[in-house]
Amino acid sequence: MQEFLFIRLNELILLIYLLSIACYFFDFVRKNHRIKTIGFVTLGVVWMLQTISLSLYINVTKQIPLGNIFDVFFALAWLIISISIVISVIKQINLSIFLFNIIGFLLIAVNTFQPMRYQSTGEKLNIINELLIVHISFAVISYALFAFAFVNCILYLIQYNNLKQKKFDQKYFRIGSVATLEQVVFYSSLIGFTFIIFSIILGAQWGFNTLGGYILIDPKV
């Protein structure tokens, strides 16, 4: 029961953390004070929940979370979040905080979906299945974003050609400006790339936990 609650708490942390990172990214792109405030508040909630999670871990195991690499990841993620909050208060450097917390999110995800840290066989199987679902979900999201970027890239080429030939007809004004399309392609590709990196890392973790070293010579990989 304790392991089940611990897993669900960490999954809740991941969801809120993802929302916080998304808010920081949106504020970096559009400069929205309200969204930035939401990002900071949710980051504070993540810090509070992770502090509770670390306290529960220390209370149950009677040891500092430095016993293995995955526990170190979790402690390091807590430190990253703490530093991010301090930086947010002292200085406004949203891009650095966004990139810094991507690392923190990845560390928490790897720690949460590590089945070997749980004693119950049922919980190990649940974590492995959830890890596979998250891996596939992130991959599908990245594919959708890349497809969206591809469509806008085609529109960008069409619009650039219209601009070059000075064809300012009704279609030109309906497609959108070259600058807007360029931004959409860039940010869609950037977010898609972030999700695919997460997917690959979590997929590799799932593969090593289910197939072992054989995954390295699997032709599909």
Image (tube, rainbow, N blue to C red):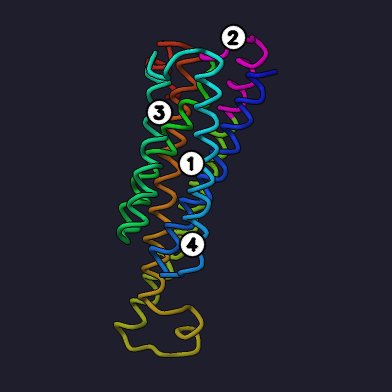
Is residue 210 something that shows in the picture? no
Q: Nearer the viewer, residue 46 or 30?
A: 46
Task: Return the mark for residue 75.
Answer: 3
Residue 142 at x, y = what percent? 48, 46
Instruction: State how far apart marks 3 and 4 are (Cα).
Output: 25 Å
Q: Are marks 1 and 4 in contact (CB under 8 Å)?
A: no
Q: Which amino acid type is shown beneath numbered disc 1? A: Trp
Q: Residues within 10 Å of mark 4 (few under 14, many from 20)?
A: some
* Residues rendered magenta in the picture: 117-132
Number of numbered discs? 4
Q: Secondary structure at mark 4?
A: helix
Q: Quarter of the image containing the N terminus?
A: top right
Task: Return the mark for residue 119.
Answer: 2
Q: Are marks 2 and 4 in contact (CB under 8 Å)?
A: no
Q: Is residue 94 above or below residue 69?
A: below
Say which quarter of the image contains residue 100.
top left
Q: Quarter of the image containing the C terminus?
A: top left
**Disc 4 designates what residue?**
37
In primary-sequence order, the first of circles 2 and 1 is 1
Q: Secondary structure at mark 3?
A: helix
Q: Which amino acid type is shown beneath numbered disc 3? A: Ala
Is residue 213 something that shows in the picture? yes
Task: Return the mark for residue 47.
Answer: 1
Q: Residue furthest right?
A: 1
Q: Which amino acid type is shown beneath numbered disc 4? A: Thr
Q: Secondary structure at mark 2?
A: loop
In primary-sequence order, the first of circles 1 and 4 is 4
In primary-sequence order, the first of circles 1 and 3 is 1
Instruction: State how far apart marks 1 and 4 are (Cα).
Output: 15 Å
Q: Are marks 3 and 2 in contact (CB under 8 Å)?
A: no
